[in-house]
Amino acid sequence: MTISRRDAIRISGSTLAGLSLVGVKSEQLNAQAPQTTAPAWPDSLVETPMREGFPAPLPLNPDGSAPVHPASAAGPISDPLMWRTPERQTPDGEADYREMAIKVDTRRLARLSGTLRFADLEALPRVTQTFLLQCGAPDPRGVVTWTGVRFSDVADMLGLLPTVHYGRFVATDGHYVDEPMTTLRHPQVMLAWLMNGAPIPLRHGAPLRLIVPFRYGNRSIKAITEMVFATPSLPMPPLPA
């Protein structure tokens, strides 16, 4: 059988292409292979490894309150700071607590609502307390002296009804926490604007920060911009006898 010159060129080209693949390393071929999909979610409950050392236990008093430290033990808060922003960067906000303007929405469940100013807080009894901030990881963030007002005094100033169940606190980074009023009215819970005797820096939560020392540190939300108070439903009327 005779082969034309064109067929001979085509065959030799295919042969050379096949030989060139022999020299390609296996890892190069693997890199070009399509990626496998993630394992399917189990269709039943299965044993799952627990996160080791998390959450770290909170060092609390037997009654569930936070230990009070001497002011001499106060110092800085260690990094990293847990902002809910790209690369954990501190968001822009008002750094001067004297210029704070915080939206307060009481959903018509209190005597007052509107915008909270520093003058409103300045009229309340000032308190200073030194607490440890403990995150969920084993290392604490630091013992800090906070100055501000008890949240219970703020609630009374607003005239919140006893039927209000919880408060929501919103920060400049969009993060928020919900706390029941039974927690917020604990005498250790504060709204603070001073940290170790100086104005709270922006990176640590200026102009106003919630301090809940017997909860993990992420509950002590930084840089409050809004407070909302609500109840899941109105009280039920008396049932018929």
Image: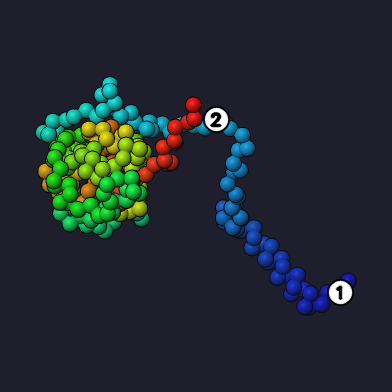
Quarter of the image for residue 77 reads top left
**Looking at the image, how many numbered discs can be counted on the residues?**
2
Q: Mark 2 points at which residue?
A: 47
- At 67% from the left and 62% from the top, the residue drawn is 19
**In this orientation, does residue 213 appear?**
no
* Looking at the image, residue 183 lies above or below residue 8: above
Q: Which disc, if any, is residue 2? A: 1
Which three-letter amino acid code belongs to the residue tagged 2? Glu
Q: Which of marks 1 and 2 is in front?
A: 2
Quarter of the image for residue 128 reads top left
Crowdedness of circle 2 by 10 Å Cα count: few (<14), some, many (20+)?
A: few
**In this orientation, does residue 15 appear?**
yes
* Mark 1 / mark 2, whichever is N-terminal: 1
Quarter that holds the N terminus: bottom right
Colour mode of the rendering = rainbow
Residue 116, x across and y down, in percent:
23, 52
- At 14% from the left and 38% from the top, the residue drawn is 127
Which three-letter amino acid code belongs to the residue tagged 1? Thr
Quarter of the image for residue 34 reads bottom right
Residue at the right extreme, as displayed: 1
- At 57% from the left and 53% from the top, the residue drawn is 27
Report helix, strand or loop for mark 2.
Answer: loop
Residue 56, x across and y down, in percent:
34, 31
Q: Which disc, if any, is residue 203? A: none
Residue 222, x across and y down, in percent:
27, 47
